[in-house]
Image (cartoon, rainbow, N blue to C red):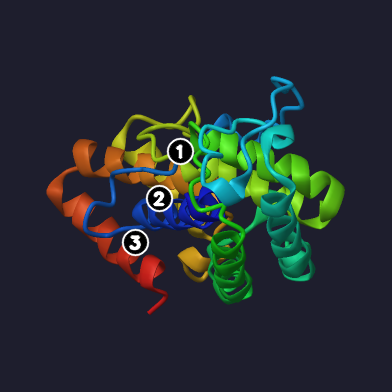
Amino acid sequence: MTRLSIPSLLFAALLALSACGSTSDAGTSDAGTSDAGETTSETTGEAASDGADGDASGVSTLDELPEECRQPIAEFLRAIEPAVSEVDWENATMADVEGMGSAVDAPGTELDTALADAGCEDLQPDTDAEALSMMIELAEDEAPGTVSWLRFIGTFASVVPGAGVSDDLPADCDGAIAYAEGLTADAESMMDLPVSELANLGAVVETIQSECSPEQANTFLETYATFVTGE
């Protein structure tokens, strides 16, 4: 599993976030939560086999990661730290997420190459949560400015319908429309909306589609489509 699944986690997170704002299925909120952001220092005490032999599969802690595989990951984190540390990830918008693509892509490609050259391509943590947990633990030592970004990725990497949605959202048509209008009032488009609000927005759009009359729902969705596209 190249790059310890982190680029694939980012891609999955972007897909989940995009699904929240989709006008083709606006009522479905796929942004999920994950406990991948929780770091772990517990180890088994057993070192993994040398990555050069291709036998390092099944690693689940940072201590099991061979040094020749650990160093390229540390270099990747240091390379992206200046860019990702500039963003307040607790209040990040879709524009912030989109802007990280170019900052992460080239270092990620270099990481792929370095891991392949070191014989680390067979590293396969049991879960993406374990992969991200190891990355965060390494980041805390090597590139602390990337930790908030990694936790953000962990939050939105798991596509779990309904996860991350507030418990007190309105369940009636008028309340759902008012809630959605309140979320979008100060944003010109979805790109300006805090990512943390996207799951709630998707949920109330679903309520509008199911609880409002066709006329009310269509009137709202016309405006909502403009908000999603920014046009």
Q: Horizontal and vertical percent for residue 113?
A: 56, 69
Residue at image coords 49%, 40%: 124
Q: Are marks 2 and 1 in contact (CB under 8 Å)?
A: yes
Crowding around mark 2 (Cα neighbors within 10 Å: few <14, some 14 to 19, many 20+) is many
Q: Which sits earlier in the primary sequence, circle 3 or circle 1? A: 1
Seen from the viewer's position, the closer of residues 216 and 99 is 99
Mark 2 falls on what kind of element?
A: helix
- Which mark is on residue 16? 2
Q: Horizontal and vertical percent for residue 27?
A: 28, 45
Mark 1 falls on what kind of element?
A: loop
Q: Horizontal and vertical percent for residue 218?
A: 20, 57
Q: Which residue is mark 1?
A: 32
Amino acid type, callout 2: Ala
User: In this orientation, does residue 182 appear?
Assistant: no
Crowding around mark 1 (Cα neighbors within 10 Å: few <14, some 14 to 19, many 20+) is many
- Which mark is on residue 224? 3
Q: Is residue 163 left or right of residue 113?
A: left
